Image (tube, rainbow, N blue to C red):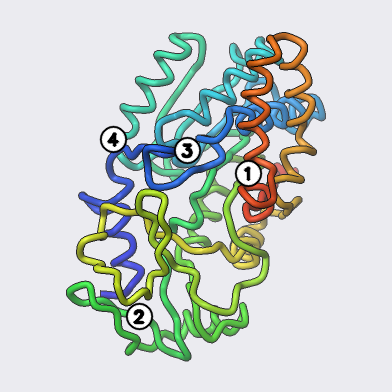
Amino acid sequence: MRFSRYMHDWLYGDEGYYAHYKVIGKEGDFYTAVSSSKFFGGSIAKHIIALVDEGFLSVDATIGEIGAHHGYLMADIIEFIHTLRPELLQTFRFVIIERFAALQQQQRQYLRECFGDAIHLEHYDTLEALHVKQAFFYANEIFDAFACELFYKGRIATVCNHQVVFEEEDAVITELAARYHKDRGEIAVGYEEFAKAMADAAEQFEFMSFDYGEMQARPDFSLRVYDKHQTFPFFDEALQYSELFGTSDITYDVTFEHLKDAFEASGIIMVAFKAQMTALIEMGLLDLLQMLQQHVDQELYKQELEKAKLLIMPEFLGERFKMIRFRQYQKQ
């Protein structure tokens, strides 16, 4: 089989890594911004409110998360909206796009425990099933988990019995590799279909996503496996793929230029691309921390401050992770 199918099955098959709930953070295989500090979601909430104030979103807009895992990020966003502009919880419609029924149930239960009937929440299996007038979509670390083809000097990888070889040719993948100046590395598949589905899901929307990578492609393979906070290059000869398949995370750096081109092909405009540190500060992270300092004791403030620092420290998440933001305007 092609490597893209192998990676898809590794992550999303019946026994795939993301098919069942996984712990993220200290007890899991890796950290994310969500597991580091609730002020990640708080900054997004502040940005959503700013979109309402500037008139881009109406008070009855849809707020949609793509792949919500446990539901922690949506809960953080809702909590901060309640603190900053509580009346919006009565009018916003909250939506989660989640393919796995078991995870839908986990998310539904967690958000019900947090907010009861105070919010309106719906689940959709796919973006294609949704159509609304106005929306703010967001995601955290999804594009690094899109299946990819592995490309090496004109050949793509295939897998048989967990053995990877470069034998086949593919004109489309070769053309993409040339466009992004790669003679080796990962070529994501599915960005174009995802962008088109989002373009059809809402007449006007903003989409914000955080992931690691760079605008231009790196000149080598970045594919790696995360297992209990250890990172292993995929082509490490010591790795036993058959033992790691479906039990550990597999990921690669996002080429944001490819993502940008995919969205622009569907008529969606890129409006921002920044390091996570810069993006969160501009969205008001420091303002939220200052508000916290005024309302809690110093010890609690220091604890939350140390957690929030992880979001913006260059050596942790601040520089390596990027924020990209797109907009589609309603056609007149």
User: Farthest residue in the left direction?
Assistant: 161
Residue type, mark 4 in image: Ala
| Residue name at image x 67 percent, y 13 percent | 83
Say whether disc 3 or disc 2 marks the residue closer to the N-terminus. 3
Question: Image point 40% across, 64% down: which residue?
Answer: 232
Relative height, residue 223 to residue 15 (above, below): below
| Position above or below: 94 against 315 | above
Label 1 and label 2: CA atoms lie apart by 32 Å
* Mark 1 residue type: Phe
Which of label 4 and label 2 is nearer to you?
2
**How many neighbours does mark 4 have within 10 angstroms: few (below 14), some (14-19), or many (20 or more)?**
some
In the rendered structure, which disc, 3 or 1, sits on the residue that comes first in sequence? 3
Amino acid type assigned to the residue bearing label 3 in the image: Leu
Q: Earlier in the sequence, mark 4 or mark 1?
A: 4
Q: Earlier in the sequence, mark 4 or mark 2?
A: 4
Closer to viewer: mark 3 or mark 1: 1
Disc 4 to disc 3, C-alpha distance: 17 Å
Q: Which residue is mark 1?
A: 207
Residue 325 visible in the snapshot:
no
- Give yes or no for contact between labels 3 and 2 (Cβ–Cβ under 8 Å): no
Disc ID at residue 130: 3
Query: Is 137 placed left or right of 267 in the picture?
Result: left
State yes or no: discs 4 and 2 in contact (Cβ < 8 Å).
Answer: no
Residue at image position (56%, 62%) is 254
Residue placed furthest toward the front: 299
Q: Position of residue 4 (x, y in %)?
A: 36, 68
Q: Which residue is mark 4?
A: 101
Residue situated in front as seen by the camera: 5 or 203: 5
Instruction: Tell me the SS state at disc 2.
Output: strand
Q: Which mark is residue 157?
A: 2
Residue ID at (45%, 81%) = 151
